[in-house]
Image: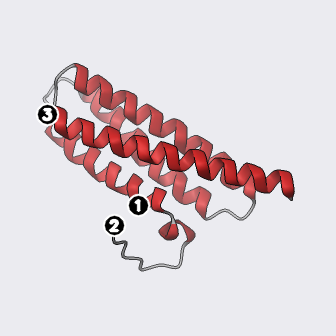
Amino acid sequence: MTHSSTTGFAHQRLDAFHVAMELTIGVERLAAALPRGHADLKDQVRRAASATMRNITEGANRWAPRDKAARFIIARGECGEADAALEMIERLELAPKTEIRTLRLLANRVGAMLTRLIKLQQEAVRIG
């Protein structure tokens, strides 16, 4: 995956940020195509995916390991929420299964990356 970085911000160096961005863009496209009558679900999946990416960004740009870990923990929770909303969309058959499964795989990747980032920051707190 090629990342074009135009800033020196720390989040640009994290694969988790780039995968979360890919997830957010995919969710936006999916949500735009959802049928009428599902505004709450559409809003929920959009907000959760976006919050995942934003909290990764915020965590990466914090200085203290405890602050970083806290934001990454929030991001992981939001990512799980996005996955649950995607599962609901899948079970209600509101979008193509292949598209949903691709997005759920991205969410799973982000969740795994965040688990590792959280552990690294928690270890830094214990050592520091």
Counting residues from the start of the chain, the first of labels 2 and 1 encountered is 2
Single out the mark in the foreground, 2 or 1.
2
Alpha-carbon distance for marks 2 and 1?
9 Å
Which quarter of the picture shows residue 128?
Answer: bottom right
The residue that label 1 is drawn on is 18
User: From what the image shows, is residue 54 above or below residue 12?
Assistant: above
Q: Badge 3: few (under 14), some or many (20 or more) residues near its Cα, within 10 Å? A: few
Foreground residue among 99 and 58: 99
Of the numbered discs in the image, which one, if any, rests on residue 96? Answer: 3
Which quarter of the picture shows residue 47?
Answer: top left
Alpha-carbon distance for marks 1 and 3?
24 Å
The picture places residue 10, in percent across and down from the top left corner, at 56, 70
Residue shown at 53%/41% (left/top)?
76
The picture places residue 65, in percent across and down from the top left corner, at 74, 57
Is residue 126 toward the left or the right of residue 17 in the image? right
The picture places residue 20, in percent across and down from the top left corner, at 41, 52
Residue shown at 37%/72% (left/top)?
3
Q: Badge 1: few (under 14), some or many (20 or more) residues near its Cα, within 10 Å? A: many
Foreground residue among 30 and 19: 19
The residue that label 2 is drawn on is 1
Of the numbered discs in the image, which one, if any, rests on residue 106? Answer: none
Quadrant of the frame with the N terminus: bottom left
Residue shown at 16%/23% (left/top)?
93
Q: Amino acid at mark 1?
A: His
